[in-house]
Amino acid sequence: MDLSNLTGNLPLIIGLIVVLLIQFYFMRKRKPDTEKNIVQSVLLDVKINQAITELIKDGRKPKKFSSSNYSINKNRLDFLSHSLVASLSNAFGIIDDYNQQIRAAKKSKPPGYVEIDVKRLSGPLAESREGLEDWLMAHGGQQGPPIKYPSIFDTLFGTGR
């Protein structure tokens, strides 16, 4: 065995391992599920769904609505007011129905068209958004997530813009 090549490359190998460990450490960091983070994630779903309803109003093809953050956190919303939870439940119940119709239409041969009543959905979504933003203003001081400025590691490891 010739170890002379290994000793020449040893600093490079150690440096690469250190960089990988640093990257793993920063990628692994995760925000704890605080009430504020839960509200912000559900608010993100509401905002996305409002944008989709606007696209449908403009005559575009219906897309699947977003409900993943709500589905994950719906059992942890007991700190919100009862009326807000009811509004969220109503809005995401309608969204689940529409998503099932969209999936069924895509599976049918030939693909069918789904008629979505945007007025029925826009009311509960607007109520939900207003309630969630009010809650954030009362408990956090801002309506959206804080602005994240790129760090040196974001630039080095390609996670920055």
Image (cartoon, rainbow, N blue to C red):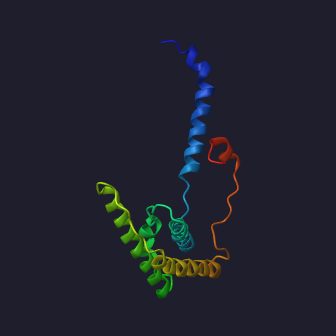
Q: Nearer the viewer, residue 123 or 139?
A: 123
Name the foreground residue: 144 vs 109.
Answer: 109
The reply, left or right, for residue 152 in relation to residue 41 is: right
Toward which corner of the image does residue 148 lie, by quadrant? bottom right
Q: Position of residue 115 (x, y in %)?
A: 40, 69
Question: What residue appears at the point 52 percent right and 12 percent down from the top-left corner?
Answer: 2
Q: Please state which of residues 59 and 10 is positioned toward the viewer in this rendering.
A: 59
Q: Quadrant of residue 54?
A: bottom right
Q: Give the side of residue 103 with respect to residue 47, left or right.
A: left
Q: Residue furthest top?
A: 2
- In the rendered image, residue 6, in percent from the top left (x then y), is placed at 56, 19
Does 2 sit above or below residue 50? above
Q: How many marks?
A: 0
Who's the residue at 31% across and 54% down the image?
Answer: 110
Q: Position of residue 90 (x, y in %)?
A: 42, 80
> As drawn, is 92 to the left or to the right of 134?
left
Q: Find residue 95 and report its horizontal and vertical position in percent.
A: 42, 71
Q: Is residue 115 above or below residue 105?
A: below
Q: Nearer the viewer, residue 44 or 21?
A: 44
Residue at the farthest left position: 109
Residue ID at (52%, 71%): 46
Is 143 left, or right, of 73 in this rendering?
right
Q: Residue at x 48, y 87 (%)?
A: 83
